[in-house]
Image (spheres, rainbow, N blue to C red):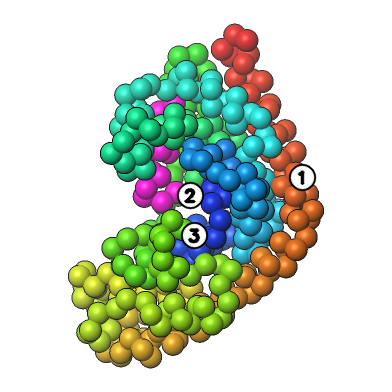
């Protein structure tokens, strides 16, 4: 069955191994299935829910697009663009915000986590962010959206908005309620310094993550210093339940080597971490270094990246603007 795929990544700079394993690697796999049509968006409108440096934002948009292309996303096969180039996203977000309900947004746990204790100082944009996400998806009639567990609630909101719009305006199936594509294995890669925390660009320690633009020496050093425990590597998955760092490192190896976690455990069972870390570092270098080199090469030709985003935006705009026109007819504009 053919799927219409939509997904987006925020341009916050320094994409890392967690972004690659948890999202981009899967984007490439979905694109390479000929039954799928894929749209991948650099969601720069989402990025400004928190204050951005304009020059850094512009560069981060290009870096994210470069990472997409360097990782294997084909701009001739998939639509790759940045959100702010397609006005329908903002317009659709306003219309859908009049369909969504305050109670729905008040249940969004991610806002509570990101806003912290002082919600009064959070931007309105951060609060209504999930409605913009709904517009991103619904304007393209996406049937499936690759999401992590932390975004699943937002996708449920997209479904609620679609169903309410269809009901309110007696337009059955006009807005398609999308299904989640949740990566079952290795969807969350954790910090190299703390196996209980997700690998993040916002972590002040560079040693907590492998950036996609790290060189070979940096990768070796970070893996060498990655936190572990004192026990040998386990014999079974059950033994990983209280060993988050071991589980994280074994998961990285399994994903990058396209094998199951159990196969990886069997391969390294009883061995010490130092020998395993050498193999893991070499595997990361083998998989990530070509991406890093291609990112750096692409970033030297900013006009090329900008042209890819512009061409993608024209393709996206044809789809999204048509949907907005039909939405306006339905609601009486």
In the drawing, what numbered circle is on residue 90?
none
Residue 41 visible in this rendered orientation of the protein: no
The x and y percentages for residue 263 are: 37, 79
Q: Residues within 10 Å of mark 1 (few under 14, many from 20)?
A: some
Tell me the quarter of the picture where residue 235 sits. bottom left
Query: Is 40 above or below relative to 316?
Result: below
Tell me the mark number nearer the camera, choosing from 2 and 3: 3
**Quick one: SS at disc 3?**
helix
- Nearer-the-camera pick, 278 or 23: 278
Provide residue 264's location: percent of width, then percent of height. Answer: 37, 80
Q: Which mark is residue 19?
A: 3
The alpha-carbon separation of the residues under discs 1 and 2 comes to 23 Å
Is there a contact, CB below 8 Å, between mark 1 and mark 2? no
Decide: marks 3, 1 in contact (CB < 8 A)? no
Tag 2 secondary structure:
strand
Going from N to C along the chain, the mark reached first, 3 or 1, is 3
Res 182 seen here: yes
In the displayed structure, 95 sits above or below 154; it is above
Magenta segment boundaries in residue numbering? 147-161
Q: Is residue 148 inside the magenta stretch?
A: yes
* Mark 2 residue crowding within 10 angstroms, few (<14) / some (14–19) / many (20+): many
Residue 61: x and y in percent read 63, 50
Left-right relation of 278 to 238: right
Residue at (69, 37) in percent of width and height? 85
Question: Residue 181: image x %, image y %?
Answer: 45, 49
- The residue to which callout 1 is attached is 311
User: In this orientation, which residue lies closer to the viewer: 299 or 183?
Assistant: 299
Residue drawn at point x = 45 percent, y = 41 percent: 179
Q: Nearer the viewer, residue 291 or 62?
A: 62
């Amino acid at each position: 069955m053919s799927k219409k795929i939509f997904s987006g990544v925020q341009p916050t700079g320094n994409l890392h191994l967690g972004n690659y394993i948890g999202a981009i690697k899967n984007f490439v796999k979905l694109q390479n299935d000929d039954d799928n049509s894929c749209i991948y968006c650099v969601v720069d409108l989402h990025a400004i829910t928190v204050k951005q440096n304009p020059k850094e934002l512009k560069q981060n948009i290009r870096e994210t697009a470069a990472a997409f292309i360097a990782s294997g996303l084909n701009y001739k096969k998939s639509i790759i663009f940045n959100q702010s180039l397609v006005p329908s996203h903002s317009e659709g977000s306003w219309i859908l915000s009049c369909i969504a309900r305050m109670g729905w947004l008040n249940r969004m746990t991610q806002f509570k986590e990101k806003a912290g204790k002082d919600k009064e100082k959070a931007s309105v944009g951060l609060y209504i962010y999930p409605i913009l996400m709904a517009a991103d998806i619904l304007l393209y009639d996406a049937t499936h959206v690759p999401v992590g567990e932390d975004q699943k609630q937002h996708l449920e909101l997209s479904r609620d908005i679609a169903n309410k719009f269809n009901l309110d305006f007696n337009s059955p199936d006009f807005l398609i309620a999308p299904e989640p594509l949740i990566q079952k294995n290795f969807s969350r890669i954790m910090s190299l310094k703390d196996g209980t925390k997700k690998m993040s660009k916002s972590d002040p320690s560079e040693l907590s993550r492998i950036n996609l633009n790290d060189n070979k020496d940096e990768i070796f050093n970070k893996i060498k210093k990655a936190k572990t425990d004192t026990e040998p590597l386990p014999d079974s998955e059950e033994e990983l339940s209280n060993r988050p760092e071991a589980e994280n490192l074994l998961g990285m190896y399994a994903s990058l080597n396209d094998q199951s976690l159990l196969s990886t455990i069997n391969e390294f069972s009883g061995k010490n971490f130092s020998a395993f870390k050498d193999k893991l570092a070499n595997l990361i270098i083998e998989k990530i270094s070509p991406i890093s080199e291609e990112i750096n090469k692409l970033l030297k030709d900013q006009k090329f990246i900008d042209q890819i985003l512009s061409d993608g935006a024209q393709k996206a705009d044809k789809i999204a603007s048509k949907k907005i026109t039909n939405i306006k007819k339905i609601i009486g504009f």
